[in-house]
Image (spheres, grey):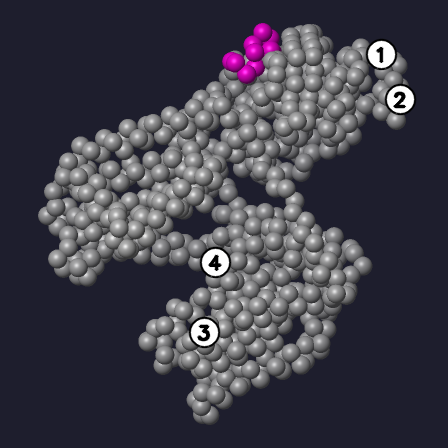
Amino acid sequence: MFRQFLKLEWKQYFRSSYWQKGLALKIIMGFFALYMMASFLVLGIGSFFIIKKLMPDADPLQVVNSYLLFAITADLIFRYMMQKLPIMNIKPLLILPIKKSKQIHYVLTKSVFSPFNFFSLFFYIPFAIVLMNQGYDILGAFGWLICMLLIIQCANFLNFIINKSNTAFWTLATILAASSTLQYFEVFDSKALSQSVFDTVYANPIFAVIPTVLLIVFYMINYKMLSNQLYLDDAVKVKVKTANTADLSWANRFGEMAPFIKNEIRLIWRNKRTKTVFLMSFLFVLYGLIFFTQKTYQDMPGILIFASLFVTGGFVLNYGQFIPAWESAYYKMLMSQNISYRKYLESKWFLMSIMTTALFVLATPYIYFGLDIYLMIVVGAIFNVGFNTLVLLYAGSFNRKQIDLNASGFGNTQGASAKQFIIILPVMGFPVAVFYAFSLPLGFNAGLIAIAAIGVLGLVTKNYFMNIIAKKYIKDKYAAIHAFNQKG
Amino acid sequence: MIQSNNITKKYGTTEVLHIEELTIPKGQSFGLVGNNGAGKTTFFNILLDLIRPTTGQISNHDVVVNQSESWKSFTGSFIDETFLIGYLTPEEYFEFIGDLRGMNKADVKSFLTKFEEFFNGEILGKKKYLRDLSKGNQKKAGIAAALMGNPQVVILDEPFANLDPTTQIRLKKTLKELTENKEVTVLVSSHDLSHVTEVCERIVVLDKGHVVKDIETSEETLKELESYFSV
């Protein structure tokens, strides 16, 4: 039986739609994964020496130990939000002659190998090896490492137990917030507590038995809970969200565009992926902080322009890129309706402009970094509204990849193709090039004015270009419908 | 024999199923009809221990379904496509189920040859995963899998929906053959009155969770049912 399950796992993994992507995308994602792993590894190996350098008097192990309780609580909160038991996988097995106990052990064992349990290994394992190399007690460091591995697994199983309760989440969040605050005001020293706990483990590796016992207990609790919940109207239930029908009648004032705008708002708010894009665009506002606060970038206006475009462009870039693929599932239906292409596209343009304006308002505090920075953000916003919206709408007519709106949002690259990388050139590279073309001979302000001028030009000639874009969409309609019908 | 005693299912205060007593003797071909929300699938789900009844219990060949799992070895069922393993090819899926039902590769192969006609060349050897098959073809695969390993009880929820007319006729033939010797109990649910009357010797009509008719099929049954539903 175990062999059967293993075979299923293997097939599920290698046949997931994840692998059915274009080769270029696979290579890029592969590099990204390698890069992430390498950085974690470097951090794991390096942290010992970094701590040593920053705090020459402290013992790096003790420093790390003093933060471990916080790390574990934070890990639990993170898991609470992101990690779910892959219970739906066993639905097809329910009606087969496989004992329920086996099915439960299978799901629980599977969760041991969840990616959530591997992130921190990249830190703990190299760190422990460095400890052993640096003359720490081998047995102690080994016990410490084993203890950490077991605690990760405990967190894994504890999460599934508390996962359904909101109280558990808020308790954890409160503990973390309270202990951090009390630590800050030196009322209660949780760092010392944390340090003493894990120092003890290092001194007496035998204490690694405690998490072992905990792990067994948590596993048993999970097992008990699941054996009572393995029903279609309980744990193995497809969650159906109650439809929330917000009143969007205020959008009626937009006349012919109103139905599209209303639909667009519902599209964004009711689907995971679009919602992520929407919320991410607010995070992009903070992007400037990385660049504007660093001295290194102050003499590189090109980079700063780049950052300014991102500050207000989060929505235009992330959402606009995939127009009209967001609607691929029902594009056929749209095309069979009596709609005006101009109005359809206009509503998307309108939405992108409104969002850029909203993000621009949110970006107002950047004035703090000086007038030059703020002006960059102003021209960035003008450029995003005037030029980038049109370019992205036009580029959208080349979108030929279907998007499954129900798939998760984070790090999802479905619908992406080489086009998405090429599009960076006109929307991000072009303004920077324009800036240098004018600022090098004529000065900083001339560069900014040139970018703004292009944006304004786009706004003025919008109608002309929208007509061209609409014609392009009509021309490509059949190809798009055909492509959106292809799954995967 | 399937015996159901005082089965009810409530979600909150809404009662979706209430069947006081229902006995299906061994070898009977049993049809369950009713409009949407009548409780057909709920009844099958309880019978397969996929959901728990609020009260009462069902036993399948003297095994109380939510107390022991031994009924699984002689019960084959197909509810809907979500019970297929989408990332397997049909061949692999049959092999997997065959394994669980104690069939070796040769058994599975000879079993599948009987279904060549039923599959109409659209299931096997297509190099496609189950998730990429059409709904009708997924259903064909699921129904065939439910019949693997000589089950004593076969439960099919809406087996005729999404099937093309030829396959519907072939399925009816297969189901009739199954119950010929009065060995295998077959339970099907359907919206289609004519299919059910053709296949089943007994038809139970559910309405809002209650049994409103329990008919032994005869010449007049179809008319009776049609007049009942044409309100």
* Label 1 close to label 4 by CB (< 8 Å): no
**Farthest bottom residue in view:** A442
Q: Quadrant of residue A307?
A: bottom left
Viewer-proximal residue, B224 or A478? B224
x and y percentages locating residue A205 in the rendered image: 17, 35
**Type of amino acid at the residue the image marks with label 2:** Ser
Q: Secondary structure at mark 1?
A: loop
Q: Quadrant of residue A247?
A: bottom right
**Type of amino acid at the residue the image marks with label 3:** Tyr
Q: Is residue B16 above or below residue A191?
A: above
Please rate how many residues cluster around mark 1, counting C-alpha atoms within 10 Å: few if below 14, some from 14 to 19, many from 20: few
x and y percentages locating residue A464 in the rendered image: 71, 78
x and y percentages locating residue B130 in the rendered image: 59, 36
**Location of mark 4 (residue):** A24
Q: Secondary structure at mark 3?
A: helix
Q: Is residue A256 above or below residue A164?
A: below
Question: Disc 3: which chain?
Answer: A
**Location of mark 2 (residue):** B227
Please rate how many residues cluster around mark 4, counting C-alpha atoms within 10 Å: few if below 14, some from 14 to 19, many from 20: few
**Location of mark 1 (residue):** B218
Which portion, as a residue range, is magenta? Answer: B59-68
**Type of amino acid at the residue the image marks with label 4:** Ala
Q: Secondary structure at mark 4?
A: helix
Q: Secondary structure at mark 2?
A: helix
> Is B60 in the magenta?
yes
Q: Which residue is painted at 81% across and 23% down in the image?
A: B193
